[in-house]
Amino acid sequence: MMPQKNRGVQRNAGLKILSLNTMCRLILMVESKTLMWITGRSIEQFKCFGDAVTFDTTCKTNLYDMPFGLFVGVNNHFQSIIFGGVLMNDEKIDTFNWIFTEFFQMVGAPRPRTILTFQAGAMEVAIEDVMPHTTHRWCKWHVLKKAEESLGPLLGKGGEFKQEFNKMVHHMVSEKEFEDGWACIVEKHGLQKNTFLTQIYETRRKWAKPY
């Protein structure tokens, strides 16, 4: 059992904050049963490498099917580093607002210049509230994963459409090049009325490389 002198408990506006020691901080939002933690090393790393952050809550493999989110960055050796983790009971706007607000208070550092997430309306609203000056982009991996699920046979192995689509997504770096390439493959394959392609084209500034 942890000695009492190493643990302090503070209650404030429905929050229970546990300061286990200088190496680990836990904070619990009682009402929504949301638990977030961060280490002392993560705080120092965030101050050096926190200008670009990924926040992903797509993992739900735990026993209680609760979304598990990670704040992740990249250091100067191009290695992934974990800034903090959060176990959530829901994915509502208020919950994301609380997570982002408390996270930046815990690390004691400015908001990142860029944050990457998957497509989630509630998260997008919270980011605009808490990080109004941060550039928000969608993780391309999640966009392409949805493309595979939605386009099915079109992205079959070795297919012409797949080659053209991958070239446009991964290698085109100018806006004109992307726009022309998109128009070309949509017309060539008769996909003008494809709902998924229409949706991701309308949101291209959130995920496409040229933007």
Image: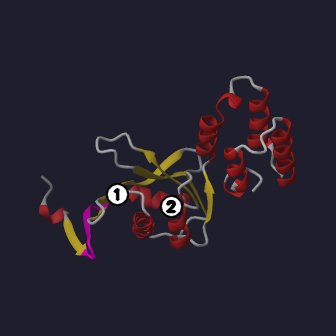
Look at the image and name its color scheme: secondary structure
Give the structural element (helix, strand or loop) at label 2: helix
On the image, the x and y values in percent for residue 94 come to: 41, 68
Assess disc 1: are there few (<14), some (14-19) or many (≥20) residues with their C-alpha within 10 Å of its C-alpha: some
> Which portion, as a residue range, is magenta?
12-26
Q: Which mark is residue 37?
A: 1
On the image, the x and y values in percent for residue 40 come to: 37, 59
Depth order, front residue of 172/144: 144
On the image, the x and y values in percent for residue 108 come to: 44, 70
* As drawn, 97 above or below 84: below
- What residue is shown with label 2? 123
- Residue 21 is one of the magenta-drawn residues: yes
Q: Which amino acid lies under the numbered mark 1 shown in the image of this protein?
A: Trp
Depth order, front residue of 62/120: 120
* As drawn, 45 above or below 167: below
Q: In this view, does 168 lie to the left or right of 3?
A: right
Assess disc 2: are there few (<14), some (14-19) or many (≥20) residues with their C-alpha within 10 Å of its C-alpha: many
Instruction: Looking at this view, name the residue that lies furthest to the bottom.
Output: 13
Q: Which residue is drawn at 61% across and 53% down?
A: 138
On the image, the x and y values in percent for residue 207 come to: 67, 52
